[in-house]
Image (cartoon, grey):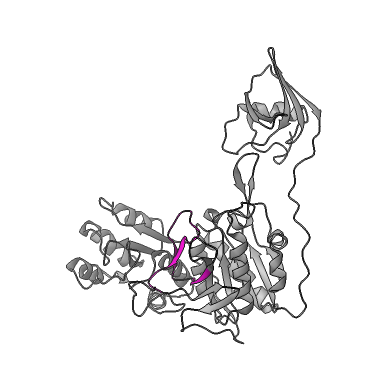
Amino acid sequence: MMNEDVLRGYRGRLREKLGSEKIGIGDLIKVEYGEKSYEGILMPRLESADEFHIVIKLKTGYNVGIAFEEDMKIVRLKEAKKPTFKPPPLPESSSDLPEISIISTGGTIASRVDYATGGVHAAISSRDLLSIVPELSEIAKVEGDILFSVFSENIEPKDWSMMAKRVADKIKSGFEGIVITHGTDTMGYSAAALSFALSSLPVPVIFVGSQRSSDRPSSDAASNLIAAVSAAAQAPFAEVVLAMHETSSDDSIVFHRGTKVRKCHTSSRYAFQSVNSKPLARFRDRRIEMIEKNFRHRGGRELILRDKFNERVALLKFHPGFNPEIIDWAVDEGYKGIILEGTGLGHVSSKCYKSIERAIHEGLIICMTSQCIWGRINMNVYSTGRELINLGVTPLEDMLTETAFVKLTWALSQSNSREEALKLMATNLAGEFSHRTLYTWK
């Protein structure tokens, strides 16, 4: 049987038929059944498509799908030249520029459109990104390093640890700034994770993504990457931040603190917003402008790596009709902590009280955040909140739910006791709390 790359998207009997004829993607083939005959190039199929159709590109340029039948005759006429992606060579950088490492984890910024299928594939390495964006050679001496290549929905806490370790290795090797390319859907979680895992940072760590792949005319990949590398090389701050468009235009990129940023739009360029906080800085006209005056300065500190995360933490969103047995399930399954995303100022139904009380009695940490994007919780206003505090629920002020979840996975792994973990949760370590919650920063 042919390997998966040669017959990508084909399965079952059709795949066996093509394999027996030594046919692969890109070959010129002839398909005959009954009185009908088609000639064309075998095209790949989406992995989720059915297994009963063969797709070929005709001489006219159109693709046609043909229903597979057992008595169908399929022969290879000749092996066609396989399409490949060949970026131009890397440009040379001046020897006196700062050294920056781009660590690739995948996502749209490291993807391209497969025009055969219309799908997006994680296919471009960080090295390819350098060749596509030659302006980077004027900003820094850039090294590309592929850590892994996945879409961000597949990233787990163990991957946060891998990112943190790789960043630590790069900093110890002398790099003056780090850029991490990442899929946007869970980039906020990863930025928060490294904000806690990398303490006493001496250089900037910039997460960057894009909403459109780098080979689309409307791509934001190049502008985002230029801004990220510029900040890694030149910015005065030494924090974990996330770089994305400020508006729908290419005029400016903003840098959000890793613990205060949330993806608020599915597809717009300005999808990420700082919540209950100002962005840290802005990149405009090829310059870094500081927005927030209170920041950790770049300097000669020694990095402290605390990269462990406890995966036995649940994030539960309260809703009308919420079944408290979900909390009991978490207890029975050996979970160590729960983040409850409650309503308004931090409330859940009184029907949950018994399960919450049991969980806390069993030693779990239960913390409360709000479903509201802006504002802070105050569990002392209404009796429901006060009752939850009396049960042992810990309020988390204006911490984002996603950040709270990440921080609890981290705090539990750094502690030898429940009390020690709770103390970490209540301590402002990486700007995750705002002393005064803003209505808006503009």
Determine the image quadrant of residue 422: bottom left
In the image as oriented, which residue stretches furthest toward the left?
383
Indicate yes or no whether the magenta region holds residue 408.
Answer: no
Quarter in which the C terminus is drawn: bottom left
Determine the image quadrant of residue 144: bottom right
Vertical relation: 5 (above or below) 375: above
Q: How many marks?
A: 0
Q: Residue at x 27, y 61 (%)?
A: 343
Q: Residue at x 39, y 65 (%)?
A: 401
Vertical relation: 23 (above or below) 161: above
* Nearer the observer, 160 or 281: 281
Quarter in which the N terminus is drawn: top right
Left or right: 93 in relation to 203: right
In the image, the segment drawn in magenta is: 253-277
In the image as oriented, which residue stretches furthest toward the bottom?
300
Q: Percent x, y for residue 400?
A: 39, 67
Indicate yes or no whether the magenta region holds residue 256.
Answer: yes
Residue 331 appears in the picture as rendered = no
Vertical relation: 259 (above or below) 61: below
Q: Residue at x 60, y 73 (%)?
A: 286
Q: Percent x, y for residue 253?
A: 53, 68
Q: Residue at x 57, y 71 (%)?
A: 206
